[in-house]
Image: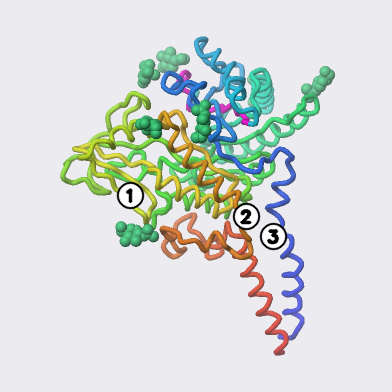
Amino acid sequence: MGQIPFSLILISLLVTLPVYHTTAHQECSNLNTVPHQVRAGYWFSHTNRYSPVYNINTSFYTHLYYYSLSLDDVHSQVALPPNDQLPLLATFSATLKAQNPSLKTILSISTDDRHQTNVSSAAFSSMVGNQTLRMSFINSAIELARNHAFDGLDLAWQFPSSSSDMTSLGILLAEWRARINEEAKNSSSTLLLTATAYFSNHLFDGPVDNLDYPIDSISDNLDWANVLCFGYHKNSDLTALDAPLYDKASHFSTSYGITSWLVAGIPACKLVMGVPLYGRSWILKNKMKNELGAPVVAMGPRQKVSNQTGLMAYSEIKETLKDPNIVFVYDNQTVSAYFHSGDLWVSFDSIEVVEVKIEFALQKRLLGYFLWPISFDDSNYTVSKQASEVWLRNHDSPYDEDENGFEQAPSPAQPPSPAQLPSQDHALTPSAAFSGSRTHKLHLDLYILLFLLFYLSTI
Ligand SMILES: *[C@@H]1O[C@H](CO)[C@@H](O)[C@H](O)[C@H]1NC(C)=O
Ligand SMILES: *[C@@H]1O[C@H](CO)[C@@H](O)[C@H](O)[C@H]1NC(C)=O
Ligand SMILES: *[C@@H]1O[C@H](CO)[C@@H](O)[C@H](O)[C@H]1NC(C)=O
Ligand SMILES: *[C@@H]1O[C@H](CO)[C@@H](O)[C@H](O)[C@H]1NC(C)=O
Ligand SMILES: *[C@@H]1O[C@H](CO)[C@@H](O)[C@H](O)[C@H]1NC(C)=O
Ligand SMILES: *[C@@H]1O[C@H](CO)[C@@H](O)[C@H](O)[C@H]1NC(C)=O
Ligand SMILES: *[C@@H]1O[C@H](CO)[C@@H](O)[C@H](O)[C@H]1NC(C)=O
């Protein structure tokens, strides 16, 4: 043991430090289309009856998604909606931009289309696996976006289910980006490209293990990724929280999902966190047993706006909560809310939950958040307004990153420590506990550096 090994360590540290700390910035500045912030909303075309486009108050959003069109797997092109919905698609962007010219609209292409239930994830799988089909799909998507004055495109594949899907997805995104850049030369703007993805970078409930998103391609080719931070316990036979921010007992939480993406290497400035405007409902087995984890016998009844069993729109929840006999619970440890009334039990994101989640996104320095879907907000756009106000208040108020000002603010609940997280596949390592906070990383490195200097001076 002499001075040489330690000098080597010191030199390598000094060499790698600056690279390490500027990676995120470089990855975010290599696309000139990257916006400063994203306060997005998904608008579901099949809810037009309850939430017409001209009623949307666009002041609460920077980006609005038309959700969604599907894949015509015969021609490998984006499928047009049924004829009665064509005018809606054609006027969506113009209607919204007439109200707010700085708003950007994005056309989402998904596996979740209500009109073409037979177009499955398997159809996406075949398309992305073949170069000819990919190019045909990409060209049709770009043409459709331009013809209807959209500013961007989104791929909402829910979800890739094999490692070849993941590899092909990475190739698709690279080809799509190249084509968009090429097309931009003939246009006054560059189309945005985003993807709607699973809450975690690793798929837990897929048919195969070891299924991770192609992080490099996502980071290099997308303007950002929207991650679906909800739906954590869809098929539970016990009452459960659909989208808690924290969960000490499992990895099904928004903090876990967001952290997993960051640890995997996506820059925070390319990550956008989802917030649900629906609640998940169940019928209790015994209405006297109405706590979290109580047995249920069925999904809650179909409601008018959501038009699906087991789901309630925020607007419908708000109406229901006017009944003074309803028991409403906000849990500040998991950051979640639920209510029960007779044998109905509903987990949802109350205004309090939304506020804390938006603050979490700010603490993690994420690019923004999205609401899913804005069609479920009440007629005053209460959630959209609140989310936007909390974001703008904190995002635009200057704070000194090195002072760590924001993170010292009292937080309602601590995220689980690494030791409390599950040890299987994606357990967060101690270094992961520092992810999302460049300041923490920097401090850690400086301590190591000081320690080494001190050590060297003693030999
Ligand atoms: C949208 O909301 C803002 C802020 O609450 C309000 O000032 C504005 O009048 C609303 N616009 C419309 C068209 O309702
Ligand atoms: C979907 O598939 C079912 C059964 O295979 C078939 O009967 C139905 O016509 C298909 N629907 C469409 C829109 O293709
Ligand atoms: C890709 O799709 C095209 C068009 O359907 C087909 O002609 C070709 O054989 C496919 N290529 C492969 C490798 O499957
Ligand atoms: C750009 O426009 C030129 C001339 O109209 C055309 O030949 C070319 O194919 C276009 N390029 C792209 C990428 O659309
Ligand atoms: C509700 O969903 C059913 C099918 O699940 C559909 O037939 C019906 O048209 C939908 N109603 C509305 C109002 O969208
Ligand atoms: C919307 O706001 C108005 C005025 O504050 C209020 O009277 C009304 O009840 C609100 N509607 C809903 C659905 O919250
Ligand atoms: C969380 O809720 C508990 C019980 O209601 C309360 O005692 C505690 O002060 C709350 N903590 C915060 C940070 O709000």
The part of the image, by quadrant, that contains residue 18 is bottom right
Q: Amino acid at mark 3?
A: His
Q: Amino acid at mark 2?
A: Pro
Q: Amino acid at mark 1?
A: Tyr
Which circle, 2 or 1, is nearer the viewer? 2
Q: Residues within 10 Å of mark 1 (few under 14, many from 20)?
A: some
Determine the quadrant in which ligand 7 lies: bottom left
Instruction: Give the quarter of the figure containing the N terminus.
Output: bottom right
- The earlier-in-sequence mark between 3 and 2 is 3
In the picture, the disc for residue 330 is: 1
Judging from the image, what secondary structure is the residue with disc 2 in? loop
Whether residue 313 is visible, yes or no, is no
Q: Residues within 10 Å of mark 3 (few under 14, many from 20)?
A: some
**Is 116 part of what is drawn in magenta?**
yes
Judging from the image, what secondary structure is the residue with disc 3 in? helix
- Residue under numbered circle 2: 398
- Residue under numbered circle 3: 21
Which circle, 3 or 1, is nearer the viewer? 1
Q: Nearer the viewer, residue 312 or 16?
A: 312
